[in-house]
Image (cartoon, rainbow, N blue to C red):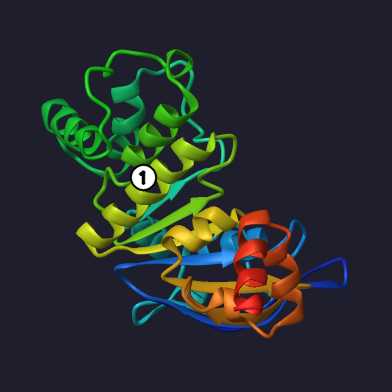
Amino acid sequence: MIKVEHLYKSFDGVEVLKDINVTYEPGKCNMIIGASGSGKTVLLKNLIGLMEPDSGEICYGDKRFTAMSYEEKKVLRQNIGVLFQGSALFDFATVIENVMFPMEFFTDWSAAQRRERAQYCLEKVNVIGSDDKYPNELSGGMQKRVGIARAIALNPSFLFCDEPNSGLDPYTSILIDRLISDLTKEFNMTTVVNTHDMNSILEIGDKIGFISGGSMLWQGDRHTILDTDCRELRDFVCANTLARNIIEGKGKA
């Protein structure tokens, strides 16, 4: 579980995050949603330590992340997996070398143990027979799968996904959504997904927090989001044709 309390962040005197309070639960796809410039990416970066908040608390379980030393954060990060927006695979490394990369830094496993774990993770994301291929030989969807395999390589309790469907076709996006959801539940991870993709939100949004203007204006799930009374969220949702049609259909019923 990750708990955020009274989080503030500003740049050059402009508040980007304003009194954020939210809890992210294990075994669920916890989603941060909002339009571009809403503050959702800044929140994600604060959660994983790429930025420091001006004030407020971020707790991983009973551990205060914001009060940890550099060494303490380094230990915690071994329990965190991250899927970056562009997968962030190393072009000079093969698929299996990419997945083994975090193990080389954070474990004392032998080369055989690292390879065995990497192959297990690749099997989990259904990437078979591509160990020796390079990222440029893979489709965008396959690169995302390899990125997920690397993110779970150290068997993390916490998984962060930044725009996991960016650049993917609708069918592949659904497959990646379901993969993230299935792994979250299988390993009981606390998964936090940063997205503006309404299809993903409606597909796997177990818990959803909507940010607008740096404030968390609404929290709910995929079952309640279409019934919201929050004007800003309703405008965001209705920018998606499918969601708008569903809402309009409910209104006529």
Residue 89 against residue 78 in the figure, above or below: above
Q: In which quadrant of the rendered view does residue 234 lie?
A: bottom right
The residue lying toward the viewer, choosing from 92 and 193, is 193
> Which residue is at a point 26% across and 19% down the rendered structure image?
131
Q: Position of residue 230 (x, y in %)?
A: 70, 83
Q: Which residue is drawn at 54% across and 54% down?
A: 199
Q: How far across and how far down the image is residue 197, in percent?
A: 59, 53
Give the quadrant of the C terminus: bottom right
Residue at image point 61% right, 56% down: 242
Q: Could you tell whether 17 is left or right of 88 in the image?
A: right
Mark 1, residues whose alpha carbon is within 10 Å: few (<14), some, or many (≥20)? many
**Quadrant position of the N terminus in the picture:** bottom left
Can residue 71 be seen from the camera position used here? yes
Q: Which amino acid is tagged 1? A: Ala
Q: Position of residue 104 (x, y in %)?
A: 29, 34
Is any atom of residue 56 visible in this view?
no
Tell me if 236 is positioned left or right of 192 in this view.
Answer: right
Horizontal placement of 221 versus 50: left or right? left
Q: Where is residue 126 in the image (x, y as percent from the top left)?
A: 25, 33
Tag count:
1
Between residues 125 and 51, which one lies in front from this camera angle? 125
User: Which residue was labeled with disc 1?
Assistant: 151
Q: Quadrant of residue 100?
A: top left
Q: Residue furthest right?
A: 13
Q: Residue furthest front?
A: 253
The residue at 49%/19% (across/down) is 91
In this view, the residue in front, 123 or 178, is 178
